Image (spheres, rainbow, N blue to C red):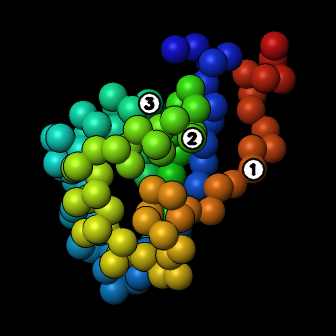
Amino acid sequence: MTAETSERVCFQLQVKPERIPEYTERHRAIWPDMAAALKATGWNNYSLFLREDGLLIGYFETPSLAAAQTGMAATEVNARWQAEMGEFFVALDGAPDTGFLRLSEVFHLEDQLA
């Protein structure tokens, strides 16, 4: 996969402040089958960043956001993970992996250097 064939996705969610320690702990070592499913369905270079007030920023690269979400929706492990993780978020509309607010990219260095 090259940068030309990758969609860069950045999103935000809000973790309930009182749940931040548990949320952080659960992500220290996610379930191995969840990690494998993410990779297999195109969630590449995936990172989460958490501010101390609960603002969560996620970033990943994928050939297609729609295909990555559809692929994960078809896995049993994702259904279990989303059911457990949904309770950690404020004002979530749907599951965390589909209910996030996608952020618009306004700058990418490699694009400007090309």
Estimate how packed mark 3 is, as few (under 14), some (14 to 19) or many (20 or more) residues with alpha carbons within 10 Å. many
Estimate how packed mark 1 is, as few (under 14), some (14 to 19) or many (20 or more) residues with alpha carbons within 10 Å. few
Q: Tell me where residue 92 appears, x and y as whole percent.
A: 50, 75
Disc on the earlier residue, 1 or 3: 3
Whole-number angstrom distance, CA of label 2 to CA of label 1: 16 Å
Q: Tell me where residue 112 appears, x and y as whole percent.
A: 83, 23
Query: Position of 40 compared to 9: left or right?
Result: left
Residue holding disc 2: 66
- Which one is closest to the eye, mark 2 or mark 3? 2
Residue holding disc 3: 42
> As rendered, which of 28 and 75 lies closer to the eye?
75
> At label 1, which amino acid type do we have?
Ser
Query: Position of 10 compared to 106: left or right?
Result: left
Disc on the earlier residue, 2 or 3: 3
Q: Tell me where residue 88 appears, x and y as whole percent.
A: 35, 76
Whole-number angstrom distance, CA of label 1 to CA of label 3: 20 Å
> At label 3, which amino acid type do we have?
Gly
> As rendered, which of 62 and 45 lies closer to the eye?
62
Residue holding disc 1: 104
Is 100 situated above or below 93?
Answer: above
Mark 1 lies on a secondary structure that is loop
Residue drawn at 81 percent across, 13 percent down: 114
Whole-number angstrom distance, CA of label 2 to CA of label 3: 10 Å
Is 90 situated above or below 56?
Answer: below
Q: Which mark is residue 112?
A: none
Is 22 situated above or below 47?
Answer: below
Residue 20 found in image quarter? bottom left
Disc on the earlier residue, 2 or 1: 2
> At label 2, which amino acid type do we have?
Ala
Q: Is residue 106 visible?
A: yes
Query: Position of 17 compared to 62: left or right?
Result: left
Residue drawn at 44 percent across, 30 percent down: 42
